[in-house]
Image (cartoon, coloured by chain):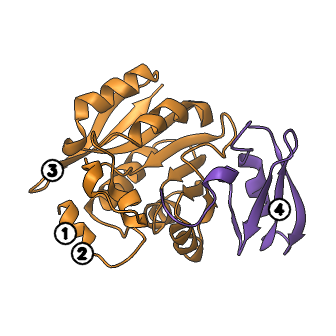
Amino acid sequence: MDLAERRGMETDVYQPAADSRLLAEAAIDRLSDRSSGRMLEVGTGSGYVAAQLRAALQWDVVASDLNPNACREAHDRGIDVVRGDLVEPFGAETFDAVLFNPPYLPTDPSVERDDWMEVALSGGPSGRAVVEPFLETVRRVLRPDGVVLLLVSSLTGMSDVTELAGDAGFSAIAVTTESFPYESLTVLELVQ
Amino acid sequence: MKESLLDVLCCPLDKHDLELEDAVGDDDVESGTLVCTECGERYPIEDGIPNLLPPDMREETPA
């Protein structure tokens, strides 16, 4: 699905799509081997991924989003949600896992719209405008053996993202990949 | 928000602990204020959702 098609969705909260499902399935698979802990889903949107994880695993699940309407929707699903900017409102060494399906579509600034769906989808000209500050700040909130599960699209530049992750002190492992007509989606596991 | 959520939260500006004031609701806080123990910045809890955006990002419209 391309940006234009996604824009056809008349809502101001990103609804679960192929990328959400891929992230939820990969995270359940990867985290079920680990002892129960506490996870954060950044940019939870509708709260779908957080709810899937909470149903499948005995973990404490916390979510955040910038969009107040997304926070409301996730809260109505019973998710503990905080309105905030990426990991800024969370304490140091707090989470055993952080999940993020970021806004990643490369977008021409001259055609960017000023609404919440644009914020949910657009990764700026490079597609990495949100991924980059996320990678720069996420390590602070991870416990020493904590991991990040990050959804990355081929449109965002896989090698650029793994390089940014490396700069932030992570090694990246691709845990699953799925191909679609316009992009392939990969879930990266980032270990410290 | 569950009061236990306070354990994972901090002031988004200086990362110090937050204190809950004027809480309405028991373990599930419906409204109240989270106050930074260091800088004193106040963050509202409305309809069970804490708003921990820095004051300059708090407006309801995007970007």
Which label number is shown at residue A183?
3
Q: Which of the chains bears the disc numbered 2? A: A
Rendered-image quadrant of the N terminus of chain B: bottom right
Q: Amino acid at mark 1?
A: Glu
How far is the residue under mark 1 from the one under mark 2? 5 Å
- Residue B29's quadrant in the figure? bottom right
Q: Residue A128 at what x, y percent from top left?
A: 34, 39
Q: Residue A81 at what x, y percent from top left?
A: 61, 62
Within 10 Å of disc 2 (Cα), the crowding (few <14, some 14-19, many 20+) is few
Residue sitting nearer the eye, A28 or A122 = A122
Q: Residue A135 at what x, y percent from top left?
A: 45, 33
Within 10 Å of disc 4 (Cα), the crowding (few <14, some 14-19, many 20+) is many
The vertical placement of A60 against A160, above or below, is below
Can you identify the residue that label 2 sits on? A8
Q: Are both tags, 3 and 1, on one chain?
A: yes
Q: Are marks 2 and 3 in contact (CB under 8 Å)?
A: no
Can you identify the residue that label 4 sits on? B33
Report the number of discs.
4
Q: Amino acid at mark 3?
A: Glu
In the rendering, what colour is chain B?
purple
How far is the residue under mark 3 from the one under mark 4? 44 Å
Residue sitting nearer the eye, B33 or A143 = B33
Helix, strand or loop at mark 3: loop
Q: Amino acid at mark 2?
A: Gly
Q: Which residue sits furthest right?
A: B22
Single out the mark in the foreground, 2 or 3: 2
Q: Amino acid at mark 4?
A: Thr
Q: Are both tags, 1 and 4, on one chain?
A: no
How far is the residue under mark 2 from the one under mark 3? 19 Å
